[in-house]
Image (cartoon, grey):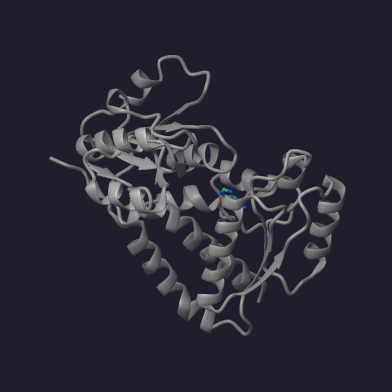
């Protein structure tokens, strides 16, 4: 029997709807500062969607766009200016940053967790490790919300997280651990990835490589969370991955590109019990959780 798709758009809409009365109850609208360095096309789309979500909800957003050749020092100065502005509830620096920037220093910058809307700063990470309240990274927090709202049990399950990024893999593993899963983290140096993944009741793929996870990685009946979002333009690859999906092939023929996750779509749908489609699974939740974090910080400030 085919797996049930987890509808990220529906859950995201629910989360955003629940935020509306909380925003209306505040003396002033929450305010989010978004910093986008350079002109990476994917980052531009993410930021545009974040700003649109703010607009739709009545959250005040401010966009800062330093040029792509800015130095780490100058970027940190810009962030210091924002951090001094008490009318701003949350500060977000869109990742990934250009190569000359010391990403680790930038991610460590928003040290005041009361403005760390992405939960990337060291204090927020410490709170996550200790399982204490604090802002949580939006994508893994969205995955937890999705599992919760679909009543998918986590306690006692074996969760395998593929990918150890600071943004998704590491916080995801900790959140699953705090929900009492037995957690394995796999990465580029893991031996026999397929064997590790086949032990997963809950498999989270956050690698950033198109369709790396295939049938040999999946235990039948597993819950599969595909965090990947990879753009494909090669017709041969698209045809082999989506041979079962006429709708997708037609849309590829029209636009010349399509999105695929880190999991091959056909085995994911055929072998899982539940799975997140790409697009429309995890993606919409990242923005919903960013809005939720912004509102929560605003409530604390006001
Ligand atoms: N790049 C990919 N995911 C994220 C995210 O959740 N926040 C930020 N700031 N950048 C990202």
Residue in the picture at 21% in, 31% down: 220
Residue in the picture at 75% in, 46% down: 106
Location of the C terminus by quadrant is: bottom right
Location of the N terminus by quadrant is: top left
User: Would you say residue 114 is visible in this rendering?
Assistant: no
Residue in the picture at 61% in, 57% down: 44
Total marks in image: 0
Q: Which sits in the foreground, 276 or 295?
A: 276
Classify residue 20 as left or right of residue 265.
right
Q: Quadrant of residue 153?
A: top left
Q: Position of residue 179 (x, y in %)?
A: 41, 43
Classify residue 206 as left or right of residue 44.
left
287 vs 179: above or below = below
Q: Position of residue 258 (x, y in %)?
A: 40, 47
90 vs 101: above or below = below
Q: Which sits in the foreground, 39 or 12?
A: 39
Q: Position of residue 71 (x, y in %)?
A: 84, 46
Q: Position of residue 160 (x, y in %)?
A: 40, 31
Q: Residue furthest left?
A: 1
Q: Which sits in the foreground, 1 or 202?
A: 1
User: Would you say residue 92 is visible in this rendering?
Assistant: yes
């Amino acid at each position: 029997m085919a797996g049930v798709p987890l509808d990220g758009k529906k859950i995201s809409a629910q989360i955003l709807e629940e935020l509306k009365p909380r925003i209306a109850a505040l003396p002033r609208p929450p305010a989010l500062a978004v910093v986008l360095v350079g002109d990476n096309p994917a980052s531009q789309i993410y930021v545009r969607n974040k700003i649109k979500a703010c607009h739709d909800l009545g959250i005040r957003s401010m966009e800062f766009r330093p040029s792509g050749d800015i130095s780490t020092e100058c970027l940190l100065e810009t962030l210091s200016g924002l951090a001094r502005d008490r009318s701003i509830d949350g500060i977000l620096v869109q990742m990934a940053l250009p190569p000359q920037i010391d990403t680790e220093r930038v991610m460590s910058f928003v040290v005041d967790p009361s403005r760390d809307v992405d939960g990337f700063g060291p204090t927020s990470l410490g709170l996550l490790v200790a399982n204490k309240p604090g802002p949580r990274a939006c994508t893994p927090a969205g995955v937890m919300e999705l599992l919760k709202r679909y009543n998918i049990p986590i306690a006692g399950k074996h969760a395998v997280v593929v990918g150890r990024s600071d943004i998704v893999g590491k916080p995801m593993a900790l959140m699953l651990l705090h929900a009492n899963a037995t957690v394995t983290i796999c990465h580029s140096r893991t031996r026999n990835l397929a064997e590790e993944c086949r032990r997963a009741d809950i498999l989270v793929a956050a690698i950033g490589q198109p369709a790396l996870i295939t049938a040999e990685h999946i235990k039948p009946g597993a819950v599969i969370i595909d965090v990947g979002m990879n753009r494909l333009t090669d017709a041969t690859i698209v045809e082999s991955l989506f041979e079962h999906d006429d709708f997708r092939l037609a849309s590829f023929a029209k636009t010349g590109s399509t999105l695929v996750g880190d999991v091959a779509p056909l085995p994911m749908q055929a072998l899982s019990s539940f799975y997140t489609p790409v697009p429309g699974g995890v993606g919409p939740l990242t923005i919903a959780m960013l809005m939720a974090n912004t509102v929560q910080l605003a409530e604390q400030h006001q």
